[in-house]
């Protein structure tokens, strides 16, 4: 009888595991809540009207349609029973011999879940479209008003969290506010636009060398972004955001401060770290259940004394490793240890502005920006998406025009 392999999640980890298993004589089932694979690093460009959702997403079935040993289902896994080796979805249950858990992550409000209504995070296409609607609608609202005091809150944007997502969002909003949208409005004074980036630590981009963090901060300041360090958000409500207890009125609060792991991981009934991630063995399996692998954002894999970050390169490498591990084991070979190859970090700040760190190499400016472009194009799935995204970026570089400024729904 053929072995049954279940993969939960069609992100970078799950998809690369599935591809690595293409030659295995087994029944593979991939389950994801969405029907598409999403290139999350470019979600902020959908949120800021630079790209269309279809430019950074591809149907999972289309990606894997030539792989005859795999079935793709759209659905949500409710629980995992490691004792009986089965998973339960909202309408069925499935047995497995191997389980690969790659559910990704969601934004975390550190116990303040009520804030999500007023400060959306950025993890899904719906999140990005929601933020895009808020940004574009705010400019439309400001255009209707004639008193500057009334316009001010609609022209204020607060991003909470100074990691790559927060920095990239702040830079992108600065550019669309100063270079793009305001050209099309007659009643808005561009000098009134306020962009505030709030970070609780003493610098932004803490995974980078301090010199690059400072270079990024200086670039943001030159672009008009007010970077508040060692500063905390104490509350968020319908009026706006309270920064160290002081209210900043705005409907535009974007959350980029933390991640949480999906609840499905709790049904494994294993210990987690402080972030809710599951500690894994050196082959990415969980303790006492070598047939269950956890990869990507949900896994806590200790590398050089600290957990690997929840970024795409980690998930991709772990997905390929686990797929190869299962393939080798079914062919009678022993398991090996996972070794992560650090390809470096890249973050863009704006047009021709980025930071790059690869080992001891630290670069900021246009060279890092060009590297950022080519790395992201390379990771996109499908020729169409690569061509479309590169075309949009070239168009924007020469024209300062974004083409995706559509308001498709308004909240009542």
Image (cartoon, rainbow, N blue to C red):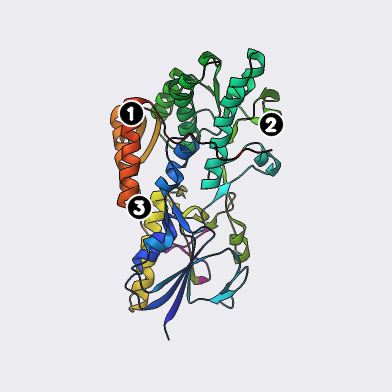
- Looking at the rendering, the stretch of residues picked out in magenta corresponds to 279-289
- Mark 2 element type: strand
Label 3 sits on residue: 381
- Label 1 crowd (10 A; few <14 / some 14-19 / many >=20): few
Task: Name the disc covering residue 331, or none.
Answer: none
- Mark 3 element type: loop
Where residue 212 sits: x, y (%)?
39, 29
Tag nearer the camera, 2 or 1: 1
- Mark 1 element type: helix
- Label 3 crowd (10 A; few <14 / some 14-19 / many >=20): some
Q: Is residue 88 above or below residue 222?
A: below
How far apart are the alpha carbons under marks 2 and 1? 38 Å
Q: Is residue 169 above or below residue 61?
A: above
Image quadrant of residue 235? top right
Image quadrant of residue 320? bottom left
Where residue 118 sits: x, y (%)?
66, 36
Would residue 363 be found to the left or right of residue 301 on screen?
left
Label 2 sits on residue: 234
Whether label 3 touches label 1, CB < 8 Å: no
Is residue 264 covered in magenta? no
Can residue 370 be seen at all in this image of the molecule? yes
Q: Residue at x 31, y 30 (%)?
A: 363
Prevalent SS, magenta region: loop
Q: Residue at x 54, y 19 (%)?
A: 193
């Amino acid at each position: 009888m053929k072995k049954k392999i279940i993969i939960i999640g069609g992100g970078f980890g799950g998809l690369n595991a599935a591809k690595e298993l293409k030659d295995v004589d087994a029944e593979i089932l991939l389950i994801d809540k969405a029907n598409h694979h999403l290139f999350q690093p470019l979600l902020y460009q959908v949120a800021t009207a630079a790209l269309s959702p279809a430019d950074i997403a591809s149907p999972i079935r289309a990606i894997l349609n030539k792989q005859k040993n795999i079935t793709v289902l759209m659905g949500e896994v409710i629980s995992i029973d490691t004792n009986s080796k089965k998973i339960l979805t909202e309408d069925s249950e499935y047995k497995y011999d191997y389980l690969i858990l790659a559910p990704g992550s969601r934004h975390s409000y550190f116990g303040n879940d009520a804030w999500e209504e007023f400060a959306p995070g950025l993890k899904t296409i719906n999140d990005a479209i929601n933020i895009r609607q808020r940004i574009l609608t705010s400019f439309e609202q400001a255009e209707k008003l004639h008193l500057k005091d009334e316009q001010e809150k609609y022209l204020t944007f607060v991003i909470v969290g100074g990691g790559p997502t927060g920095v990239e969002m702040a830079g992108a909003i600065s550019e669309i506010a100063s270079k793009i949208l305001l050209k099309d409005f007659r009643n808005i004074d561009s000098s009134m636009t306020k962009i505030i980036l709030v970070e609780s630590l003493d610098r932004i981009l803490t995974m980078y060398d301090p010199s690059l963090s400072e270079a990024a901060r200086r670039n943001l300041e030159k672009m008009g972004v007010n970077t508040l360090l060692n500063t905390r958000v104490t509350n968020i409500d319908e009026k706006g955001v309270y920064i160290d207890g002081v209210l900043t009125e705005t409907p535009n609060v974007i959350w980029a401060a933390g991640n949480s792991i999906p609840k499905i991981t709790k049904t494994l009934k294993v210990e987690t770290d402080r972030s809710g991630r599951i500690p894994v063995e050196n082959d990415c399996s969980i303790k006492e259940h070598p047939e269950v692998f956890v990869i990507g954002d949900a896994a806590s894999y200790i590398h050089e004394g600290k957990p690997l970050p929840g970024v795409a390169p980690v998930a991709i490498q772990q997905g390929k490793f686990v797929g190869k591990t299962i393939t080798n084991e079914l062919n009678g070979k022993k398991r090996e240890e996972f070794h992560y190859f650090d390809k470096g970090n890249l973050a863009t700040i704006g047009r021709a502005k980025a930071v790059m760190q690869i080992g001891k190499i630290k670069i900021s400016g246009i060279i890092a920006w060009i590297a950022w472009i080519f790395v992201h194009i390379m990771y996109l799935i499908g020729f169409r998406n690569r061509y479309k995204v590169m075309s949009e970026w070239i168009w924007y570089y020469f024209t300062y025009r974004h083409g995706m400024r559509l308001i498709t729904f308004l909240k009542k």
